[in-house]
Structures are given as C-alpha cells and as structure tokens.
C-alpha cells in the first residue's frame, strides 16, 4: 500500500476529468448563440484551463517520480512520450481559442452591438473540435502505458 501513489492518482484523475469538463463545456457553449453573457462565461471557463493544466503537469510529474513504478519505467516508454505529446498538442491547440475568448469578451463588454465574426467563430470551433479529438487519445495512451505497453 502506498498512500502517496494513491493520493497522486486520485488528484490526477480529478484534474483530468476537470480538464475534460472544460473542453466539453467550451465545445457545447461555442455552438449556441454567443451573447455577451455567454462570451463572459466562455472566457471565465477558459481561464481555469491554464490553472488545471498546470496542476496536471505538477501532479503528473509527481506520479512519475513518486508513483509505484519509479521514473525509470516512464522515461524509456514511448507510449508515455506519446501521451505527453498529445497533451502538448492539446495545449497548443487551446492557444487560439483562449486569445479569441479574451478578445471577444473584451469587445462585447465595451460594445453592446458586438457580434463574433463568422470566420473567427468557425476557426475557434475547429480548434476546439481538434482539441477534443486529440484529448481522447490521452487516456488511451495512459491506460496502455500503465499496463507496460511501450517499453
Ligand atoms: C504532464 C502531464 C501528465 C503526466 C506527467 C502524467 C503522468 C501519469 C502517470 C505517471 C501515470 C501513472 C501510470 C501508471 O500507473 O503507471 C498516469 C496515469 C494516468 N493518466 Fe496521466 N499524466 C499527465 C497528463 C494526463 C492527462 C492530460 C490525462 C487526461 C486524460 C491523463 C490521464 C491519465 C489516466 C486516465 C491515467 C490512469 C491510467 C491507468 O491506470 O489505467 N494524464 N499519468
């Protein structure tokens, strides 16, 4: 029994589900009408993205070093690095939506007639769809690496 491993695993799971919820919420909200209140909500939800992602990195690294298997298990495991790459790509894909949400929210708060430009909306939708698709790969890699695939 290793309490540190258990606690890290629990926090890791809670955080990754929170990140999935954030991506899911953005996916749904971006499809409806985008009045100022929704833009504010999107910017607010998205603000938590960075915090949760940073906590996942800290707790994930904690699992690598203080988990049951030891860091040597992961550093030479290509499935672990595939998981890291997928997580990095999801992070990169989230940059444009974040920039747009902040900009739209700022414009909507100063100009009541502001409407999100159709081209910008279409591109943000594509980025969020891609984020969601790549995110789905992460638990696939996680489950495989945890069972010794990739060594
Ligand atoms: C820097 C980022 C991350 C690091 C360093 C990291 C590291 C780890 C480590 C060391 C484990 C333990 C695996 C084992 O039992 O041998 C794990 C498990 C897991 N990770 Fe991550 N992780 C990260 C991000 C994520 C993200 C974004 C997700 C999102 C889905 C995720 C989902 C999971 C799942 C579902 C497991 C449990 C796998 C299982 O036991 O079947 N991880 N992670």
Image (cartoon, rainbow, N blue to C red):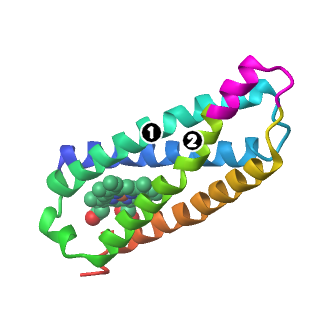
Of residues 93 and 1, which is closer to you in this image?
Answer: 93
Which residue occupies 27% across, 47% down? Answer: 6
In the depicted structure, whether residue 147 falls above or below residue 33: below
Task: Please name the residue that numbered disc 2 is placed on.
Answer: 98
For the stretch drawn in magenta, the main secondary structure is: helix
Q: In which quarter of the image is residue 4?
A: top left
Taking the magenta stretch, the answer to whether it contains residue 147 is: no
Query: Where ligand 1 lies, by quadrant?
Result: bottom left
Task: Residue 20: give x, y in percent of width and height.
Answer: 55, 49
Which residue occupies 83% across, 20% down? Answer: 112
Q: In which quarter of the image is residue 103?
A: top right
Task: Please name the residue that numbered disc 1 is placed on.
Answer: 50
Image: magenta residue range: 103-114
Of residues 6 and 25, which is closer to you in this image?
Answer: 25
State the CA–CA distance, disc 1 to disc 2. Answer: 10 Å
Which residue occupies 27% across, 44% down? Answer: 58
Task: Residue 8: give x, y in percent of width and height.
Answer: 28, 45
Choose the circle earlier in sequence order: 1 or 2: 1
């Amino acid at each position: 029994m290793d309490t540190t491993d258990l606690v890290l695993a629990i926090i890791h799971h809670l955080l990754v589900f929170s990140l999935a919820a954030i991506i899911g919420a953005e996916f749904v909200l971006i499809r409806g009408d985008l009045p100022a209140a929704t833009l504010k909500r999107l910017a607010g939800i998205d603000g938590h993205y960075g915090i949760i992602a940073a906590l996942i990195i800290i707790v994930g690294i904690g699992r690598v070093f203080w988990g049951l298997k030891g860091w040597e298990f992961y550093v030479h495991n290509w499935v672990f690095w595939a998981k890291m790459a997928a997580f990095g790509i999801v992070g990169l894909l989230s940059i444009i939506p974040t920039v747009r949400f902040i900009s739209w929210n700022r414009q909507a708060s100063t100009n009541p007639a502001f409407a999100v430009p159709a081209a910008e909306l279409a591109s943000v939708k594509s980025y969020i769809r891609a984020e969601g698709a790549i995110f789905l790969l992460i638990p696939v890699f996680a489950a495989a690496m945890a069972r010794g695939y990739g060594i």
